[in-house]
Image (cartoon, helix red, strand yellow):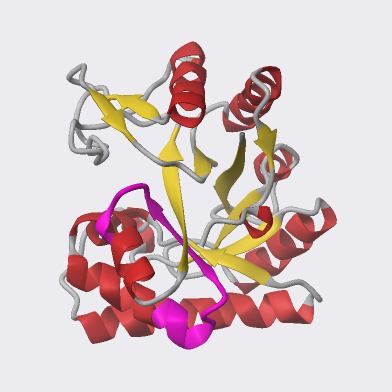
Amino acid sequence: MHVDLNADVGEGIGANETDTAILRQVTSANIACGVHAGSPAIMRATVELAQSLDVAIGAHPGFADPEGFGRREMRVSEAEVEELVLSQMRALADIVTASGASLQHVKPHGALYNMAARDESVASAIARAVRAFDPSLILMGLAGSAMITAAERIGLRTAGEGFADRAYRSDGSLVPRHESRAILSDPRAVIEQALRMITDGVIIAATGEPVRVRVDSLCIHGDTPGASALAGDLRAAFVGAGVTLRALRAHRRV
C-alpha cells in the first residue's frame, strides 16, 4: 500500500516555521498562487523550500478573495474559472521553472474546490484549464467527485483526495466547515480515519454509514492547529501500518 501525503502551504507570511515543519513530513505541497493568499515572494520561498526537501510541487489556485481566504463561493462563468486557474498556474510555473523544479499537480483551493466537487460545469472548466496548460499534470480533487470525473473524461491523470481531519457526509462529500463537528479535533480520531481510509478504502460518515472511497492522496491543512505535529503522527502511523508514503509522480494510476 502507498499514499501521497499533501499539505496546503505558502498561505502565510514567507516560508514560515509551520510550513517548514509540515514540509518535512509530507510528500507533496500545494502552493498558494498569490490570489487567495501568498505573494510572489512567498511563492518563491515556498518553492525553494519544497525543492530542498524533495517535496513534489503543485499549484493551489483559488478565488480572488483574500479577505475570505478563498473560502466564500462566487458566481463565475466557465470562462472565468478557466482564466482564473490558468493565470495562477502560469504565475507559479514561472517561479518553479526559474528554480529548476517542475510542477507535479494542480489542486484547487477552498470554495473553488468545493464547487468543483459537485458542479460539473466548474469541474470541467478547471480540467480544461489544466489540460490547456500542461496535459501531463495531475488534477487533484475530492475522491469520487465531479472534478475527478471531469478530469478523467478528457484524459487527465487524477488523484482522489481524502481529508484526515474533516467529517464526511454519507454521499462522500465533506461536512461544510460552518456546521458543528465538521472538523475532527481529536488526533486519535484523525489518525484512525486516515488509516481506515487508506488501508480499508472506507470512511465512516458523520451519520454512521460506511462510505467506500479510493484515495490517492491525503491532505493536512497547514492552518490546522498543531498541523506539523499531526503530520508527523500520521507519517508514523502509516509506517507502522506498512503504508509507504510517496509523491503522486511515483504512482502508476492513470
Residue 227 shown left or right of residue 51 in the figure: left
Residue shown at the point (44%, 70%) measured from the top left = 35
| Any part of residue 72 in sight | no
How many numbered marks does the figure carry? 0
Q: Taking 149 as reference, is 208 above or below it?
A: above
Residue shown at the point (61%, 34%) measured from the top left = 1
Residue 61 position by quadrant: bottom left
Q: Position of residue 173 (x, y in %)?
A: 24, 41
Q: Taking 162 as reference, is 71 above or below it?
A: below
51, 207: nearer the viewer = 207
Q: Position of residue 184 (x, y in %)?
A: 38, 22
| Any part of residue 94 in sight | yes
99, 15: nearer the viewer = 99
Q: Position of residue 40 (x, y in %)?
A: 62, 73
Residue 76 position by quadrant: bottom left
Residue shown at the point (44%, 15%) measured from the top left = 189
First to last magenta residue range = 129-146
156, 147: nearer the viewer = 156
Residue 228 shown left or right of residue 148 in the figure: right
Q: Position of residue 26 (x, y in %)?
A: 67, 42
Asked if residue 80 is among those painted magenta in the image, a careful observer would answer: no
Q: Taking 88 as reference, is 182 above or below it?
A: above
Residue 45 position by quadrant: bottom right
Asked if residue 142 is among those painted magenta in the image, a careful observer would answer: yes
Residue 247 shown left or right of residue 101 in the figure: left
Residue shown at the point (58%, 63%) measured from the top left = 58
